[in-house]
Amino acid sequence: MATEMVNMIITQRGFQSNSKVVTTADQMLQKAMELKR
């Protein structure tokens, strides 16, 4: 039971960091588009 809980938390942390990377990349792309105008 404890192992499953730890694995779930690790998976959730991985998902959080992946979504943070996507958000950051999206923000950088938006800034680049603004600079082009």
Image: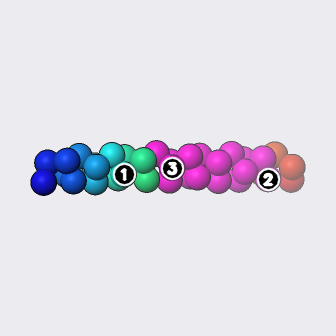
Q: Are marks 2 and 1 in contact (CB under 8 Å)?
A: no
Left/right of residue 5 with respect to residue 12 in the rendered view: left
Residue type at the position of mark 3: Asn
Residue 23 drawn at (x, y percent): 56, 52
Neighbours of disc 1 within 10 Å: few (<14), some (14-19), many (20+): few
Query: Which element is circle 3 on?
Result: helix
Magenta highlight range = 16-33
What residue does disc 1 label? 11
What residue does disc 2 label? 33
Residue type at the position of mark 1: Thr
What residue does disc 3 label? 18
Residue 1 drawn at (x, y percent): 13, 54
Magenta region includes residue 31? yes
**Closest to the observer: 25 or 17?**
17
Residue type at the position of mark 2: Met
Neighbours of disc 3 within 10 Å: few (<14), some (14-19), many (20+): few
At 79% across and 53% down in the image, what residue appears?
33
Q: Residue furthest right?
A: 36
Give me the C-alpha separation between circle 3 and circle 1: 11 Å
Is residue 27 visible to the viewer in this orientation of the structure?
Answer: no
Give me the C-alpha separation between circle 2 and circle 3: 23 Å
